[in-house]
Each structure stands twice: as C-alpha cells, then as structure tokens.
Image (cartoon, rainbow, N blue to C red):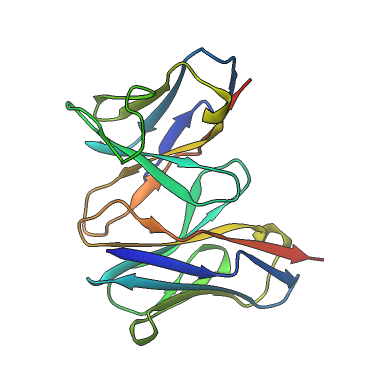
Amino acid sequence: AQSVTQLGSHVSVSEGALVLLRCNYSSSVPPYLFWYVQYPNQGLQLLLKYTTGATLVKGINGFEAEFKKSETSFHLTKPSAHMSDAAEYFCAVTSAGSYIPTFGRGTSLIVHP
Amino acid sequence: GAVVSQHPSRVICKSGTSVKIECRSLDFQATTMFWYRQFPKQSLMLMATSNEGSKATYEQGVEKDKFLINHASLTLSTLTVTSAHPEDSSFYICSAPREGVNTEAFFGQGTRLTVV
C-alpha cells in the first residue's frame, strides 16, 4: 500500500520568497513520485517527477524537488515565488507498472504581493 | 508531448437528465483510462478504470449504473452521469497513461458539472 501526506493544507508566502511544500510518502516498493499543480477549474499539470536516477529533480516554472529515501520525503521548492504560482499543489506516489497515483490531500499556495 | 482532451469543460444540467463527458487521448493510444472525481478543496478520488473493449472497473462505493463508462476506441472514453442530481455536482477529471519506461498518466482539463 502507498500513501502520501502533505503537511499544511495552506501555505502562504510573499512574492519573491522561498516556496517550500512538504510531502512525505509511504511505499513498500520503490516509489515513483510526482508533483502536480492545479489552477481553478482546470486539470492537473505535471510539475516534475522522480522515477530513478538523480534524486534532485528539476521541473517547470522553476520548481524542483529532492527525493530523500531516508526521510521518505519529496518536498517541492522554488527559490522565489511569483504571483502566478498561486494554485493547488498535489504530491502523488505510484510505482513501476502502475498508472494510478495515490494523491495527497493537496496544499493551497497563496502568494501575497 | 502527450495530450489528453476532456470535453466539455463546464456543463449545467437539470436534475433527472443525463450528461456525457468525453476524454480523448490526442496523440497516443490508451487501452486504459481513469476517471476521477474531485470535491471542493479535496484531492482526487478514483472512480473507475475504463478498459477498451471490456467493462469498466469501478471503485468501491461508486454506482456503476449512475456513472456509465464506455471505452469505445483506443483514444476515447466517455463518462455518462445518468439521472443527475445536485449531489452529483462536482469536478470530474480523466487521465490516460502513456505506456513506456516512465510511468506517467496524463490528465484532462477536467469538467465542472453543476446539476440544478
């Protein structure tokens, strides 16, 4: 079984500040990890993913995440928040051969001017 | 890149009527597609797995007679909400996997269903 915990349903930052969205996972098999972004009334857009290889993964829009097996974490960061980053972010876990991610509950990122 | 198109993006219907939502994979074939439901401020809940050429597989608690799924071709799956009621109002999202080395499912844009 797999599960995802996203700490904090809401994260509020000032424009230009560091963004840190936390994600911890549980998996009995090697995980594939994803971060998705969802804007209001839209589907999910893949930000980045980790499957194998380099543990620091760079994605779109300046986001990156680091897979830390010892901490079972896959936190999402961005050095400088932009107003357009305000959205809902979902961390998800799956594994090789599975196309059905287990999603976290989501974190709403609020960016203040 | 792979694209999944979902239509319509918004629909308003009267109670008792049926609504069909389409999910298309535009540049790849998908023998399997997935349908999710998302309640406000919540995560995605898997409703069912749509299988081309065979019956859909429904998750526990999802009424198969209420949510009819048809996977007519390798690029099209449809979800029909039958005899819709206000409690069926929700955001519905489909996804389709592109089989390959890296497991990844691509998501449609979602459909906002409002039943009045």
Q: Position of residue B103 (x, y in %)?
A: 27, 57
Q: Position of residue A102 (x, y in %)?
A: 37, 57
State whether residue B48 is above or below residue A66. Answer: above
- Work out whether residue B75 can be spotted: yes
Residue furthest front as drawn: B61
Please name whichever residue, B22 or B75, is drawn nearer the observer in this view of the structure.
B22
What count of labels does the image hold? 0
Q: Is A87 left, or right, of A50 in this rendering?
A: right
- Work out whether residue B30 can be spotted: no
Residue A61: quadrant of the picture: bottom right
Residue B61: quadrant of the picture: top left
Rendered residue at 73%/74% (across/down): A16
Q: Is B25 left, or right, of A36 in this rendering?
A: left
Please name whichever residue, A2 or B75, is drawn nearer the observer in this view of the structure.
A2
Residue furthest left as drawn: B54
Rendered residue at 32%/54% (across/down): B104
Residue furthest bottom as drawn: A70
**Quarter of the image with the C terminus of chain B in it:** top right
Please name whichever residue, A99 or B83, is drawn nearer the observer in this view of the structure.
B83
State whether residue B72 is above or below residue A90. Answer: above
Q: Position of residue B3 (x, y in %)?
A: 40, 41
Please name whichever residue, B97 or B69, is drawn nearer the observer in this view of the structure.
B69
Q: Is B1 left, or right, of B92 in this rendering?
A: left
Residue B69: quadrant of the picture: top left
State whether residue B49 is above or below residue A44. Answer: above
Q: Position of residue A108 (x, y in %)?
A: 63, 60
Rendered residue at 33%/79% (across/down): A54
